[in-house]
Image: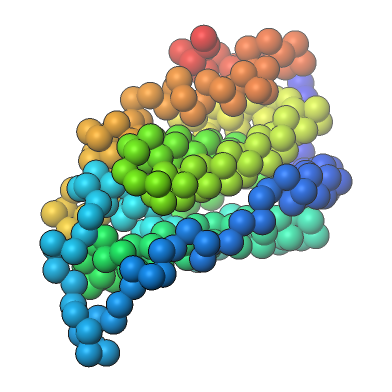
Amino acid sequence: MQNLLTDRELLEALADEVELNLRRHIEVADGWQPHDYVPWDDGRNFGFLGGTDWEPGQSELSELAELALTVSVLVADNLPSYHREVGKYLRTGSWWRWVGRWTAEENRHEIMIRNYLMVTRSVDPVQLERLRMDHMTKGFRRPALHLLDVLATCAFEEAAAAIRHRNTAALGENKIVTMMAERIAADDELQSIFFADLVAAAFAIAPDQTMRAIADSVAAFHVPSVTLPDGRSSDELLAEAGIYDPAKEGELVFGPLLQRWNVFGRTDLGEAGEAARAELAHLRG
């Protein structure tokens, strides 16, 4: 039977891998600028400064694109909660520097989308602000997790976010929306790879624990959601629109990462690891 490692032991054992992956991530991540994606010439003052307040006829986006971008910006708005939930497990050395880098990248997404929506008057700014206040006040909290659960869950979450943004880009709404969605998806994919590579490294030192964490993360997985003005959840509407469908998570989110980790081909598992792998059998391609 394999000995269980504590979270502190795992933090120390994986520290060098985190440093290597952080350097690699920074080298390949494009240092793009959010202001470049905003058509500032389209902007004008609202009524408070003597301009014209928003009315529905000003938006040139389809309802589907408005929904996708509203969900994206509200999820990104809740970054303080996600930062807290990730950071409380990783407050040391290279781990903490990765949390800072990840947070800065996620904040860049929110800056770009919000500026675009306001300048182009694509959504009701008053309603969006009310939604933001409500969403952030409710916040986000995870159940207590171990380190390996955090890594596996984050790898899945970023992969899911990339799919959502790739599908938003595929709407072909307009050139700028497509570019924004593709840019965010590329970031999401790199972040998923970062977490996934740490999970792969964990297999080398604690295969049973790592397999257990993956199985638990799959079983408990759900993407961040937003409650919209009509009371419906964004999960429901995004699934109906084909932008993100939880029914396809096995194929699109879990499957590729399980393959990356060679989950069904591993020969280094003990009894506990085999039991965890058996729980994933329904995802075997």
| Residue 209 rendering spot, x and y as whole percentages | 68, 30
Furthest-front residue in this view: 41
Foreground pick, 22 / 153: 22
**How was this image coloured?**
rainbow
Q: On the image, which quarter does residue 42 sit in?
A: bottom left
Residue at point 65%, 23% (across, down)? 260
Residue 247 vertical placement versus 154 (above, below): above
Compared to 96, does 43 lie above or below?
below
In the image, 185 versus 35, the foreground residue is 35
Q: Residue at x 14, y 63 (%)?
A: 56
At x 14%, y 68%, the residue is 55
* 43 with respect to 94 (left or right): left
Quadrant in the picture for residue 244: top left
Q: Which quadrant would the N terminus be assigned to in this image?
A: top right
Position of 102 relative to 41 (above/below) = above
Asked if residue 136 shows in the view, the reply is no
Residue 151: % across, % down: 63, 41
- Is any part of residue 31 visible from this angle? yes
How many labels were placed on the picture? 0
| Residue 180 position within the rendered picture, expressed as x and y whole percent measured from the top left | 46, 50
In front of the other: 86 or 187: 187
Q: Position of residue 114 (x, y in %)?
A: 39, 64
Answer left or right for 77 relative to 20: left
In percent of the image, x 67 and y 23: which residue is there? 261
Q: Is 233 rendered above or below residue 32?
A: above
